[in-house]
Image (cartoon, rainbow, N blue to C red):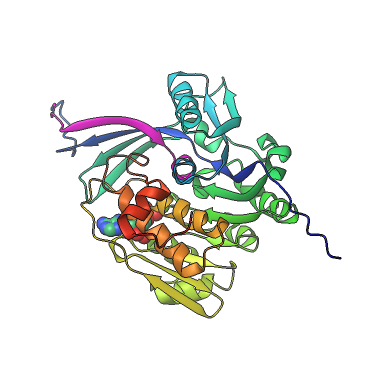
Amino acid sequence: MTVTVIERRDFDVLVVGDLNADLILTGDVVPQFGQVEKLLQDANLTIGGSAAIFACGAAKLGLRVAFSGVVGADEFGSFLVRSLTDRGIDTSGVIVDPALKTGLTVILSTGSDRAMLTYLGTIAALRYQQIDPKLLSRARHLHIGSYYLLDALRPEAARLYANAQSLGLTTSLDTNYDPTEQWQGYITDILKHTDIFLPNETELQGIAHLSGVKAALAKVAEQANMVVVKQGADGATLRKGATVLHTDSIPVQVVDAVGAGDTFDAGFIYGFLRGYDLQHCLRLGSICGALSTQQAGGTGGQPTIDEVRQYVGAEFPA
Ligand SMILES: Nc1ncnc2c1ncn2[C@@H]1O[C@H](COP(=O)(O)OP(=O)(O)O)[C@@H](O)[C@H]1O
Ligand SMILES: [Mg+2]
C-alpha cells in the first residue's frame, strides 16, 4: 500500500522585499523650478514597493500570503503594516527598525508614462538574518520583488533561494530595474535557484547583456528554469527550455501602469500554485496585469479570481 503524505503549509507564498509608501501625483506633473507652483489633477498615497504590490495582488486572488521586509518606526511604516494586515497578509516577518525612515517613492504619472523619485530609507536595509527561517518553512513558494533595490540582502539572496528549494518551496524572482544599470549583483547565482523569473523587456535585455528580446530570452532561459517576459500592451512571452508560449494582453483603458508587472506576477504565481498549465498561468498573469492598470496605484485595480472570471468567463478554475 502506498501512503501519500500531504504536507500542509500555512502560507502559499512568502514574499520578501520592498515595502514603501507611494505618493502618486497625476495631471501636469512636470515640475518647473524657479518656485513655480502648479496645480495637479489628483494625489493618492498608496501601498508601494514591487514585493508589497505583488503580495497584495496574490492575497486579493485568494492566496495565503506572508510578508518579510523592513519599515521605520514612523507614520508611513504604520500605514504600510496596517495596509498589509487589512488585506489578510501575515506581517509577523515585517521588522520595524527605529534607526531608519520608511522608504518613499513619489510617482509623477502621466497615464502612459511615469517618472519616479525614490528615497530608499528602509527599502535597502533588509538582511538575510532578518528573514525568519520558520516563516520560510511554513510557505509553499518564495518570491522576491525589487531584487536590485535590496542592497543588504542581495549578496545572500541566492543562499536564501537555495535554502527555500531544499525546504521544498518553489521560487520566483522579479528583479525590476537596476538603478546602477550594471545588471550584475550575483544575478547568475540566484537565477540558478529560480523556478520562475519574471522580468520586463528592458530588464531581460539588461540581464542578458544582449539587445533583442528573442535573443535575450534564449540566453536567460539557459540560466533560470523558466523565464516569463512582460511586454506591456503586447502581453507576455514564456520560455522554458525549448518551449516558447505567448499571450496577448486584453484591451484596457489605462489610468496608470504602476504595479502592472507585479500584479501580472501575482496572477501567474496564483495559476502556478493552483496547478494550471503554463499557457493559462500566462493568460491569467496578463489579465491581472491589464486589469490593474485601470485604477491609480499598484493595488487599486487588482482583481479577485471571481472578477477575472466575470471578465473572461469560467476559463480559470478556483
Ligand atoms: N497598456 C497596457 N495595455 C494592456 N495591458 C497592459 C498594459 N500595460 C501593462 N499591461 C499588462 O500588464 C503586464 C505587465 O506590465 P509591464 O509594463 O510589461 O510590466 P512592468 O510593470 O514590470 O514593466 C503586461 O504583460 C500586460 O499583460
Ligand atoms: Mg516590474
Q: Nearer the viewer, residue 261 or 316?
A: 316
Q: Residue at x 44, y 33 (%)?
A: 20
Q: Residue at x 48, y 21 (%)?
A: 78
Number of residue marks: 0
Q: Residue at x 52, y 31 (%)?
A: 122
Q: Which residues are magenta?
A: 37-54
Q: Is residue 2 magenta?
A: no
Measuring from the top left, give residue 295's x and y in whole percent: 27, 42
Q: Nearer the viewer, residue 149 or 275?
A: 275
Quadrant of image for the N terminus: bottom right
Residue furthest toward the bottom?
242
Residue furthest toward the right?
1
249 lies above or below 128: below
Measuring from the top left, give residue 30's x and y in whole percent: 18, 39
The answer to whether one can see residue 163 in this image is yes
Measuring from the top left, give residue 301's x and y in whole percent: 32, 43
Horizontal arrangement in the rendering, residue 189 relative to residue 257 (left or right): right
150 lies above or below 130: below
Q: Is residue 39 magenta?
A: yes
Measuring from the top left, give residue 149's x and y in whole percent: 50, 44
Snapshot quadrant of residue 241 = bottom right
Snapshot quadrant of residue 105 = top left
66 lies above or below 309: above
The answer to whether one can see residue 209 in this image is no
Horizontal arrangement in the rendering, residue 180 relative to residue 186 (left or right): left
Q: Nearer the viewer, residue 41 or 306?
A: 306
